[in-house]
Image (cartoon, helix red, strand yellow):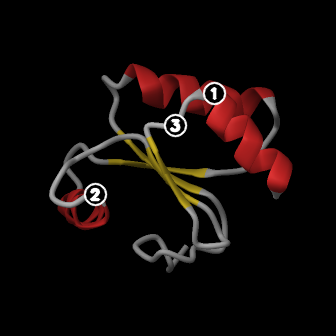
Amino acid sequence: MTDLYTKHPSQIVMYTTEFCSDCHRAKAFFETNKIDYLRVGLEGNEEAIKFVMKLNNGFRSVPTIIFPDGSILVEPSSKELQTKIAKG
């Protein structure tokens, strides 16, 4: 996928870390609901770190989830994810 570091990816992209419980919850939400997404880990990925920090005013906030419509959710609750998916 060539559009990983853009605000309009061709599919849902979730920037994450291995140790983040919110990331694990978001991953479980997508998998339980059979929603395709691409996971991009920040560990060892300077380009991903810089992109996430640019989106989040200098913070490495995860999960940062970017949707094809250009919307972004940062550290969303399960309810926020459900609302977003329901709206399309």
Q: Is residue 43 left or right of residue 72?
A: left
Give the class, few, some or many, for how many residues have Cα within 10 Å of label 3's Cα (few <14, many ≥20).
some
Which amino acid does the dot numbered 3 rest on?
Pro
Q: Which mark is residue 38?
A: none
The residue sitting at 55% across, 23% down in the picture is: 25
* Quarter of the picture holding the N terminus: bottom right
Which amino acid does the dot numbered 2 rest on?
Asn
Label whose residue precedes the other's in the sequence (2 or 1)? 2
Work out how far the residue at label 1 is from the one at label 3, CA to CA, in angstroms: 7 Å
The residue sitting at 46% across, 31% down in the picture is: 23
Looking at the rendering, which quadrant does residue 43 occupy? Answer: top left
Which amino acid does the dot numbered 1 rest on?
Ser
Q: Which mark is residue 78?
A: 1
Image coordinates of residue 31 in percent, x first then y, are 72, 32
The residue sitting at 24% across, 67% down in the picture is: 54
**Placement of 83 over or under 19, stated as above or below:** below
- Asked if marks 1 and 3 touch (Cβ < 8 Å), the reply is yes
Q: Which residue is mark 2?
A: 56
Label whose residue precedes the other's in the sequence (3 or 2)? 2
Image coordinates of residue 42 in percent, x first then y, are 28, 47
Image coordinates of residue 26 in percent, x first then y, are 57, 32
- Asked if marks 2 and 1 touch (Cβ < 8 Å), the reply is no
